[in-house]
Image: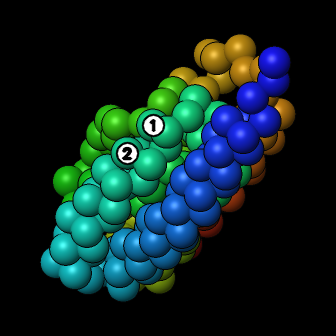
Amino acid sequence: MINFSKLQQEIKEYDTERERLILKSREVLKLSKQVIYAVHRDEIKNAAQLVKEIQQKKKELDKIALHSNKMETEGSYKIAVQEYVEALLYFYFVRDGELVSIEASPEHFVLGLADLPGELNRRAVFLAGKGQVAEVSKIRDAVDMIYGELLKFDFRDNDIRRKVDAVKYELRKLEDLVLDLKLKGR
């Protein structure tokens, strides 16, 4: 005999946990944007505090996601984690000058990594305005390396392929920026 009350209870529990996941995802997403914005303003000390906070919120989010395998495929979770990866990659690159590994599933990590060149491009334009050609070149080299490594993958997911294509366009913009700076003698 079908246990309808058990089915009802399981669906209700999933919906409750999904709502918690969505709320926590929003917190991680909001903090990700704050980290990136603080780094853009060269407020590294403030960004470091936000990184500590976001890491704690991400742990809480991951704990909620353990409720069901299906949780990791929820849109809000997926977006929050990729923004988290992007924010931490950006913070550590600007602070330490290198790309570091961030704990996330490979798919979520690659999605966040593929978003990073957009933020790096914004930073390069900012630095170009200050005449810091060597730093702009360093950013271009990092994006070139990211793009080169991503081309080695055989992505079947359309989201990832689109983002990898976007990395190519960010790289072109950076190459144009570096060329323009060199031609102007900066």
What is the x, y in percent for residue 179?
A: 60, 57
Determine whether the residue tagged by mark 1 lies in a helix, strand or loop: loop
Give whichever of 174, 12 is nearer the camera.
12
Residue found at x 64% / y 40%? 10
Circle 2 packing at 10 Å, graded few (<14), some (14-19), many (20+), is few
Residue at left offset 47%, top offset 64%: 24
Q: Position of residue 174 (x, y in %)?
A: 60, 56
Percent coordinates x, y for residue 75 in the rendering: 70, 51
The label on residue 41 is: none
Q: What residue type is labelled 2?
A: Lys
User: Where, by quadrant of the figure, is residue 70 drawn?
Assistant: top right
Is the residue marked by circle 1 packed among few (<14), some (14-19), or many (20+) residues within 10 Å? few
Q: Nearer the viewer, residue 13 or 129?
A: 13
- Residue 161: x %, y % from top left: 77, 33
Question: In the figure, is residue 39 to the left or right of 67?
Answer: left
Q: Do the residues labelled 2 and 1 touch (CB within 8 Å)?
A: yes
> Which part of the image, by quadrant, shows the C terminus?
bottom left
Q: Name the residue under label 1.
A: 66
Q: Which residue is drawn at 22% across and 81% down?
A: 46
Looking at the rendering, which quadrant does residue 23 occupy? bottom right
Residue nearest the observer in this picture, 144 or 5: 5
User: Which quarter of the image is occupied by the N terminus?
Assistant: top right
Residue type pointed to by label 1: Leu
Considering every residue shown, the one lying at the far front of the view is: 1
Position above or below: 114 against 88:
above
Q: Mark 2 points at which residue?
A: 63
Q: Left of 44 or right of it: where is 133?
A: right
Q: Which residue is drawn at 72% across and 40% down?
A: 5
